[in-house]
Image (cartoon, rainbow, N blue to C red):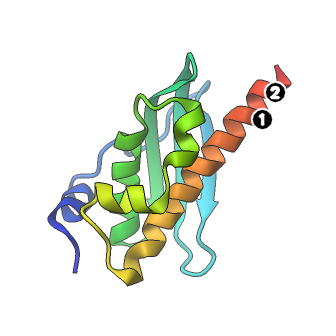
Amino acid sequence: MFSERLLEHFQNPRNVGELPEPAVVIEVENPACGDVLRLSALIENGRVVQARYKVRGCTASIGCGSALTEMLRGIAVEELPAVDASRVAFAVGGLAAESQHAAVLCADAADALHARVQTIASRR
């Protein structure tokens, strides 16, 4: 049911936890299944230099959250909207239809991070 890559991320999740300020922190939820992902990212010179996550959810959400933090490292803020559900699913070796919500949760987190960083920048 789960790919080897997803199971590897689930069993050995990377970048679990939260980053201290001045990290940007967002939280997204899938109201249909109740999964919640909290993402913190340190942004320097317009790029994500570190990302950490906490998730309350299923195997797929835990694995996808881990993969998301690896995908984000080094990415430019303006590229965050390109982190969509299909890209997250690909990063974990694919997802069954019933687990696609996990990739959507991560894509929502990337979008929320982008929006938060843009809001912070506009206030300066």
Crowd around label 1: few <14 · some 14–19 · many ≥20 (10 Å): few
Relative image position of residue 8 (x, y in whole percent): 18, 58
Q: Residue 117 is drawn in which quadrant?
A: top right
Type of amino acid under label 2: Ser
- Considering only vertical position in the picture, is 91 above or below 45? below
Query: Residue placed at 70% from the left, 43% from the top?
Result: 115
Query: Residue placed at 39% from the left, 77% from the top?
Result: 99
Name the element at disc 2. helix
- Considering only vertical position in the picture, is 40 above or below 30? above
Q: CA distance from mark 1 to mark 2?
A: 5 Å
**For the residues bearing labels 1 and 2, Cβ distance under 8 angstroms:** yes
Front residue (pair 29, 122)? 122
Relative image position of residue 86 (x, y in whole percent): 42, 62
Front residue (pair 19, 90)? 90
Type of amino acid under label 1: Thr
- Considering only vertical position in the picture, is 39 above or below 19? below
Can see residue 56? no
Crowd around label 2: few <14 · some 14–19 · many ≥20 (10 Å): few
The quadrant in which the N terminus is found is bottom left
Disc 2 marks which residue? 122
Count all numbered tags in the image, as a single digit: 2
